[in-house]
Image (tube, grey):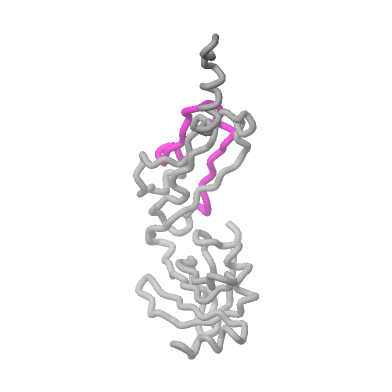
């Protein structure tokens, strides 16, 4: 697994004054979790953004602070963004122990091409897009892939119980939850009505 590192700075500015940090290009954050005294931190936005893109919420990050003797393993737990600009306003890092199981949400990603996509006869009905799992941090999957190329017939479906995961990962989400299903394409009402009328005999017929 790729090692992602992020060097933080200890933050002394708190409360409403953190807006000053943001104007300076710094993102306020906090590191907490696993019997760990919460530490207020800050990091340059230009440094943080690529780390968030690479790590998501499921890839372990080695966090560094000058006063820490060694990096601390952590996951991104929450990211607050500006609703208009999408700029990161605050980030929470959750420190983990490599020997203790954690619970986390893992995204479902779709790969492959849906064979019936251009047929006009079928559509994909999507269900859950994340599942909750429990495992050791090092065993946490970054994402779970579902191959759409295997869905060749109307009525075929993938449920949580069908997802392929390591036996080191326990799935906590209901196994009967739907992930994706092939449904018949709906005929627009006006088209169906027109077809019906076209097939009706005329009064003079």
In the rendered image, residue 148 lying in the magenta stretch gets the answer yes
Q: Quadrant of residue 23?
A: bottom right
Question: Which part of the image, by quadrant, shows the C terminus?
Answer: top right
Q: Position of residue 128 (x, y in %)?
A: 44, 47
Q: Position of residue 77 (x, y in %)?
A: 45, 66
Vertically, is 198 above or below 127?
above
At 63% from the left edge and 68% from the top edge, which residue is drawn?
50
Q: Nearer the viewer, residue 71 or 30?
A: 30
Question: Which part of the image, by quadrant, shows the N terminus?
Answer: bottom right
Q: Position of residue 199 (x, y in %)?
A: 54, 17
Vertically, is 149 above or below 40?
above
Vertically, is 121 above or below 23?
above
Vertically, is 50 above or below 184?
below
Q: Nearer the viewer, residue 36 or 125?
A: 125
At 52% from the left edge and 54% from the top edge, which residue is drawn?
142
At 53% from the left edge and 32% from the top edge, which residue is drawn?
190
Q: Is residue 65 left or right of residue 50?
A: left
Q: In the displayed image of the protein, which residue is found farthest to the front? A: 204
Q: Is residue 58 left or right of residue 32?
A: right
Q: Which residues are magenta?
A: 141-164
């Amino acid at each position: 697994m790729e090692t992602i590192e992020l060097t933080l700075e200890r933050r002394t500015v708190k409360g409403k004054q953190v807006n000053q940090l943001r104007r300076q290009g710094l993102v306020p954050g906090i590191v907490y979790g696993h019997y760990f005294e919460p530490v207020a931190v800050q990091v340059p936005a230009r440094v943080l953004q690529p780390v968030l893109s690479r790590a998501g919420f499921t890839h372990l990050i080695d966090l560094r602070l000058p006063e820490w003797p060694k990096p601390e393993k952590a996951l991104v737990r929450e990211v607050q963004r500006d609703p208009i600009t999408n700029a990161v306003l605050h980030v929470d890092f959750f420190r983990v122990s490599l020997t203790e199981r954690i619970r986390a949400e893992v995204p479902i990603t779709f790969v492959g091409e849906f064979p019936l996509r251009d047929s006009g006869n079928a559509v994909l009905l999507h269900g859950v897009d994340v599942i909750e799992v429990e495992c050791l941090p090092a065993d946490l999957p970054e994402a779970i892939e579902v191959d759409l190329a295997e869905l060749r017939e109307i009525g075929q479906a993938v449920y949580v119980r069908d997802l392929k995961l390591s036996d080191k990962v326990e799935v906590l989400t209901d196994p009967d939850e739907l992930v994706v299903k092939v449904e018949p394409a709906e005929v627009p009402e006006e088209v169906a009505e027109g077809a019906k009328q076209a097939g009706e005999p005329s009064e003079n017929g």
